Image (spheres, rainbow, N blue to C red):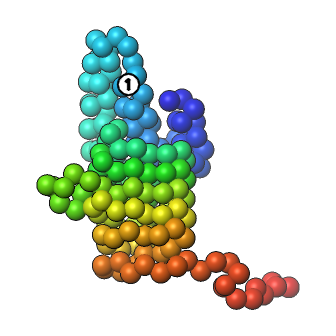
């Protein structure tokens, strides 16, 4: 737990005041408590987690339940209106911004997205349903993604249109500043 919190602190620019970092500390605590023995102590820690989770949810506007799976260096860039389903899974080095929803498409279908490594999700994006977002992909601001996004892609629009990401070599010639 403490190693993950240290990595989260570094990922949030070593800013203890970052509300995304606060949410990650409570998330990591919530995951850690599952392994605590004896059961009575675990129940006490569960009560503490539930109270802290609700406080963080109210203060920051970030809903990140410990049932979701989050990889290393997960960054919540801005606070407010962030909802992550407990069924969601994130890889390493992912970043989300304010207004993002990662969750179920339908309540009767309890399956949420599986997000790969190095995925950047823009402000206001909605990523819904049993879909996969490939590694090194970008979800544009306010995009509504309801279908799979392959690796090295960008998804933009409502509903999202998926395009391959332009690689640096495809961007054209670079100019010298001198």
Image coords of residue 134 (percent x, y): 48, 64
Taking the image as drawn, is residue 8 in sight?
Answer: yes
Taking the image as drawn, is residue 77 in sight?
Answer: no
Image coords of residue 65 (percent x, y): 32, 42
Report the front residue among 81 and 66: 66
**45 in relation to 22, above or below:** above
- Dot 1: element: helix
Report the front residue among 158 and 5: 158
Report the front residue among 86 and 149: 149
Viewed as shown, does residue 110 lie left or right of 37?
left
Instruction: Tell me which residue sits at (33%, 70%) in the image.
Output: 147
Q: Where's the C terminus, which quadrant? A: bottom right
**32 in relation to 148, above or below:** above
Instruction: Tell me which residue sits at (29%, 24%) in the image.
Output: 46
Image coords of residue 44 (percent x, y): 29, 17
Viewed as shown, does residue 123 lie left or right of 176?
left
**84 in relation to 24, above or below:** below
Instruction: Tell me which residue sits at (39%, 50%) in the image.
Output: 89
Residue 22 location, quadrant: top left
Say which residue label 1 marks.
Answer: 33
Residue 79 location, quadrant: bottom left
Check disc 1: other Cα within 10 Å, few if <14, some if 14-19, many if 20+: some
Number of labelled discs?
Answer: 1
Instruction: Tell me which residue sits at (54%, 59%) in the image.
Output: 118
Residue 6 location, quadrant: top right
Viewed as shown, does residue 56 lie left or right of 24?
left
Image coords of residue 106 (percent x, y): 17, 60
**35 in relation to 161, above or below:** above
């Amino acid at each position: 737990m403490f190693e993950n919190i240290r990595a989260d602190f570094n990922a949030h620019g070593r800013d203890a005041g970052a509300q995304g970092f606060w949410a990650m500390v409570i998330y990591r605590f919530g995951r850690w408590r599952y392994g605590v023995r004896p059961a009575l102590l675990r129940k006490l820690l569960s009560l503490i987690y539930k109270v802290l989770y609700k406080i963080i949810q109210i203060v920051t506007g970030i809903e990140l339940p410990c049932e979701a799976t989050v990889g290393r260096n997960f960054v919540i860039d801005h606070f407010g209106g962030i909802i992550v389903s407990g069924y969601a899974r994130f890889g390493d080095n992912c970043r989300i911004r304010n207004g993002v929803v990662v969750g179920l498409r339908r309540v009767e279908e309890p399956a949420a997205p599986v997000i790969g490594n190095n995925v950047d999700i823009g402000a206001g994006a909605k990523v819904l349903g049993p879909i996969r977002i490939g590694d090194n992909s970008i979800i544009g601001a306010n995009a509504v993604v309801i279908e799979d996004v392959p690796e090295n892609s960008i998804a933009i629009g409502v509903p999202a249109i998926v395009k391959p990401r332009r690689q640096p070599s495809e961007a054209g010639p670079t100019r010298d500043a001198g």
